Amino acid sequence: MSELRPSLDTPDVATAQDVVAAESTTGARSRRRSPAAMAMRRFRRNKVAVAGSIFLLVILVLAVFAPLIAGQSPNAVDLGAIRQAPSGEHWLGTDASGRDVFARLIYAARVSLLVGVAAALLSVLLGTVVGAVAGLFGGWVDSVLMRTADMVLSFPPIVVIIVLAGILGPSIPILILAIASTTWPTPARLVRGVTLAVREREYLHAARVAGAPRRWLLRKHIVPAAMGQIVVVGTISVAGAILAEAVLSFLGLGVQPPQASWGNMLNDAQSLTVIQSMPWLWLPPGLAIAMTVLAVNFVGDGLRDAVDPRQTGRS
């Protein structure tokens, strides 16, 4: 009878043990994988989002190292080189004041990125605080804050920004404040929705019973739970802020000359003659605005898909 018992050293049993060990190792690795790592893995699989990230990285490098890359001052006027076509000396030609278009294009990236990122951060910060407080406190606090958000959303944002910029004066700080003051309700409503879901969970009830203050709950539980959605809406807000800055600068209510901005560069190409015969004056800034906004939206869509809990089955 002992001859009928399979030995533990037989190939079949050893193979089975290897399979079990491999499955255990795989399961342990899967359990150790953090949500952030899985989200990053899903984001890397999104080729369009990765391409958008690479493009934004290139724009950032150009903006940071503009003095080294441009080679010329963006505000240097040369009356003997007015509206010259692209050449070896001026890669993208010159404008109506003889200034190098390539240099102004690169320096303008600094303004657009500064306004876009700063306005988005301010908007998301204000919206996060308002939404978390409204969702956690509830009652009349929630009603007042959300009705205020609804009132802000009821006005066309670009009209409000134009009015604020016209009253307070055109400048970069005023531009950032004007954009943030009209866009904070979107992250506020998003964070409020997450807060309403999180505050009903058992661990939050336990923290309340233990005497945890609401400020601690906001910092330790509410904001971390909404961080994925906050990052997504913040990324998309950058695109809206860049576009708003370009529109206001084009209308003369944003960045003022001689400081370079993609919007006020387009302002120099309003003539039909310029549009038809001098495309180097409007095509580079127009493409820069369109491609940057498109790249930011691609990154935002990729982040949204990466942090979406419904995508965990595809990780």
Image (cartoon, rainbow, N blue to C red):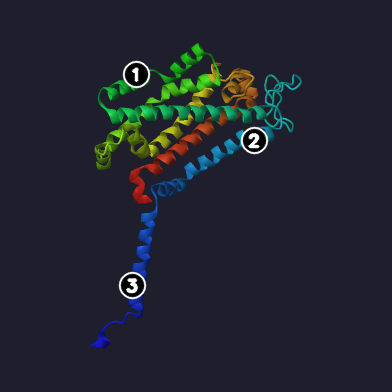
Q: x, y (%) of residue 92?
A: 67, 30
Q: CA distance from mark 2 to mark 1?
A: 42 Å
Secondary structure of the residue carrying numbered label 1? helix
Neighbour tally class for label 2: few under 14, some 14-19, many 20 plus, Cα within 10 Å = few
Decide if residue 77 is on the left or right side of residue 184. Answer: right
Sequence order check, earlier mark of 1 and 3: 3
Residue at x 63% of width, y 20% of height: 274
Q: Residue furthest top?
A: 167
Q: Which residue is mark 3?
A: 16
Using the image, determine if residue 156 lies above or below residue 210: above
Q: Earlier in the sequence, mark 2 or mark 1?
A: 2
Q: Mark 3 or mark 2, which has the lower sequence index? A: 3
Q: Say which of 216 and 84 sits in front.
A: 216
Residue with the mark numbered 2: 65
Element type at mark 2: loop
The three-letter amino acid code for the residue at tag 1 is Met
At label 3, counting other C-alpha atoms closer than 10 Å, the crowd grade (few under 14, some 14-19, many 20 or more) is: few
Q: Quadrant of residue 112?
A: top right
The N terminus sits in image quarter: bottom left
Of all residues shown, which one is farthest toward the right?
80
